[in-house]
Image (cartoon, rainbow, N blue to C red):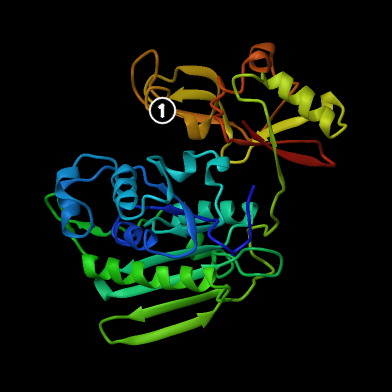
Amino acid sequence: MISQTRSGSGITVAVVGAGGNIGSHLVPHLGRCDGLSGVILVDPDHYTVANLRTQAFPGVDVGQTKADVQARRLRNINPHLDVTSIPEEIERLPWGRLSADILLSCVDSRATRLYMNLVACRLNLPWIDAGVGGNANLARVTVLAPGAGRPCFECSWDERDYAAVESRYSCNHANEDGSTAAVSTSSLGAAVAALQIFELERWLGGGDALGTELVIDLKSRNFFPSRLDFNPSCRMSHESIEIERIEHSPEELSVNAALVKLGDDIDAPLNETWLRVTRSWFATQLTCVECGHVRQELLLAASLTDDDLRCQVCGERTVPAGIDRIDTSHPDPVLNSSLADAGLRSGDVVTVGTQAKEKHYELA
């Protein structure tokens, strides 16, 4: 699924947060970067008038999805690139759609970075993360290649970092009236994007800067390079997974058929076999916070929409609860529903296993 070669012009880069304060300045450089054949642009947001102050995009594209706008810019610069636009949150994206050689992240959320670290570790993806400290004019680029004995994004974390996992480092801050004003400037985003491209070009050229971090205080002109250490007590397992692609779509397989067919593949007794999805747990119950109505479901939590989360009785918000895997102990309606009905999509990676062994499959 993942190629680790850096020769020739067959490298595909996936950019997460492709249309923001850093990503929008990064994308044009990718069109002029030697050694690339494909670029995947991931960003769920739409451009607003306020974005014109800090992000690089044509004003006529206000209201358009950031991923699509940046994809169009990139194709205009380099028509030979295979450009894929994905206007979705990475947390909702089937892992098979991130079939790239290296990951670039330009996001502003600890929670998203935490999830990206999981993806990078499991898919054995080197990744270059970039961030800004708008008020302090700080630029940061971190280069990682997760693996056994190598540092990952979480290796330097302590309890305070995990406690603050929902903190969001936005390019904007809220005023008293609820409006926002830019903190991170366009020039700061552009500076970090250029640093990220330099590290990508170093990697493309065979350079080894993996497990390093560079912080630049642009106000004082001080540079702070460092090498990151592997933490043997890191919460994240650094083990990657091997994924086999199967020619079955989520529409073609029921939950029970997947348990039977893929369980046979690992020679596992059906009553001991379970199935889970790498990107999400299963919501099996939705409870209304207003009227208390409980609705039984089987849907990937990452696939739940606003409509799914609306109470069918009073219309208020529901809270999902569920499990991380399903097995043959579930009722027939669950077992007979298709994987698509449960929220799985093409490219999703499912794991089928027992207490003793497991195997991973990408759905067609």
Q: Position of residue 189 (x, y in %)?
A: 29, 66
Q: Nearer the viewer, residue 342 or 248?
A: 248
Question: Secondary structure beneath disc 1?
Answer: loop
Q: What residue do we see at 82% from left, 39% from top?
A: 355
Q: Is residue 49 above or below residue 164?
A: above
Residue hosting label 1: 305
Q: Position of residue 14 (x, y in %)?
A: 47, 53
Q: Is residue 157 above or below residue 122?
A: below
Q: Position of residue 271 (x, y in %)?
A: 83, 24
Q: What residue do we see at 63% from left, 35% from top?
A: 324
Q: What residue do we see at 34% from left, 15% from top?
A: 314
Q: Position of residue 358 (x, y in %)?
A: 78, 40
Instruction: Name the quadrant containing residue 267.
Output: top right
Q: Is residue 245 visible?
A: yes
Q: Nearer the viewer, residue 35 or 326?
A: 35
The type of residue carrying mark 1 is: Thr
Q: Is residue 185 visible?
A: no
Instruction: Name the quadrant containing residue 256.
Output: top right
